[in-house]
Image: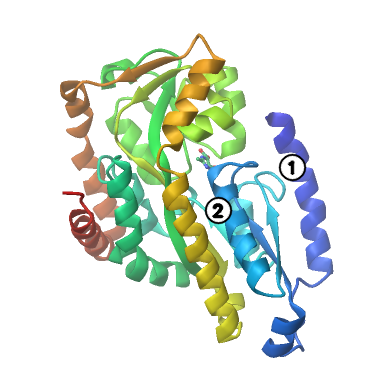
Amino acid sequence: MLLKKVLGTAVASVLVAGMVACGGSEDKTATNATAESKGQNWRYAHEEYENDVQDVFAYKFKEYIEANSAHSLQVFRFGELGESDDIMEQTQAGILQFVNQSPGFTGSLIPEAQIFFIPYLLPVEEAHIMAFFKKSKAIKEIFPKLYAEQGLELLTMYPEGEVVLTTDEPIRSPDDLQGKNIRTMTNPLLLETYKAFGGIPTLLPWGEVYGGLQTNILQGQENPLFWIESGGLYEVSPHLTFTGHNQFTTAMMANKEFFDGLSAKDQTLIKAATDYAFNYMTEYVPGLGEKKLQAIMDASDEVTVTRLTAAERQVFIDRAPQVEQKFVEITGESGQALLEQFKADLKASAIQ
Ligand code: 6CS
């Protein structure tokens, strides 16, 4: 994993230098109509590996764009252009046209994106979470304005699966987390969550995680099951606990200047390609975690799975309000309004 990262970063520098030297994909003198008929090569980076959830999304998006226009889409996976923060910077700078970055890394850019880390706010039930992402006004109306302020056209947000805690020993309570360094994405509110849950929050980019667990610098981390399987995290952090405290959410967006400069036809194409990929995910993600858990159990005899009783879970749930309060403190009135809309959307999308 570490080697992959080092190589990835080296390749990234060369690729980015090449892209800048070529002046990007846009022919500044071409009219939109010429660009449409000749087609352009658009660049899209995400945070995961081949066949992971973000990769499946990206390739569905590409399939639609290429089947319905003269444009082509080049997809870059984790490490090819650097870490998550690197691909975001490259998108804001216009070197990339599209990026998939999870709110876990967007929190410092857009504080309100930390709402996804209030524990026990999002449901783990797959039908409920999908209904929420399909309809949520907070996601469709409030978030696009917040992303636009950062030069980004938010195209969609979608879930990747229930977050599961993995550790070096089985966990049943906050006391069991005492003294353990728990890696989270680089998001200030996740720090509050793991403080509240009893551990020592350790905010790190993805590239540091496997090695940190392997060398016991870290004693745990949280992620959805597909990622625990594909990243081999169960090999170095084999005790899985279903705390039920969150869903992994991610977001896909375009450079806003690029998007605003496109013809109405190309903007419609991009929105349709996003809907096509999103609809695919509504079928692809539910049930994925269970399949990946089976693959993990088949691959390792060391893995244990802890499903908390209602009473054990309640001890963690009781610690969530302090994190919600911190979110409101950090984000003020805008965060409060977003939280109210979020709660209304969650209620409206609850499955009866
Ligand atoms: O934990 C992380 O950093 C990573 N987790 C997932 C599921 N996707 C990308 C992200 O970098």
Residue in the image at 63% along x and 68% along y: 65
In this view, the mark in front (2 or 1)? 2
Residue in the image at 34% along x and 51% along y: 130
Residue 101 point in image, percent of width and height: 53, 53
> For the N terminus, which image quadrant?
top right
Label 2 belongs to which residue? 57
- Tell me, for residue 8, which label it has, or none: 1
Residue in the image at 66% along x and 68% along y: 67
Q: Residue 161, relative to residue 293: is it above or below?
A: below
Q: Residue 66, relative to residue 189: is it above or below?
A: below
Q: Quadrant of residue 142?
A: bottom left
Residue at far top of view: 301
> For this rendering, which residue is in front, 54 or 121?
54
Residue 170 placement, left or right of 32? left
Residue 284 point in image, percent of width and height: 47, 46
Labelled pair 2, 1 in contact (Cβ < 8 Å): no
Mark 1: few/some/many CA within 10 Å (<14, 14-19, 20+): some
Disc 2 to disc 1, how far (Cα)? 21 Å
Q: Residue 110, relative to residue 201: is it above or below?
A: below
What count of labels does the image hold? 2
Q: Amino acid at mark 2?
A: Phe
Q: Quadrant of residue 346?
A: bottom left
Residue 2 point in image, percent of width and height: 69, 30
Identify the image's colour scheme: rainbow, by chain, secondary structure or one colour: rainbow
- Does the image show residue 31? yes
Residue in the image at 69% along x and 82% along y: 36
- Does the image show residue 151? no
> For this rendering, which residue is in front, 11 or 27?
27
Q: Is mark 1 within 8 Å of ligand 1?
A: no
Residue 242 placement, left or right of 48? left
Mark 2: few/some/many CA within 10 Å (<14, 14-19, 20+): many
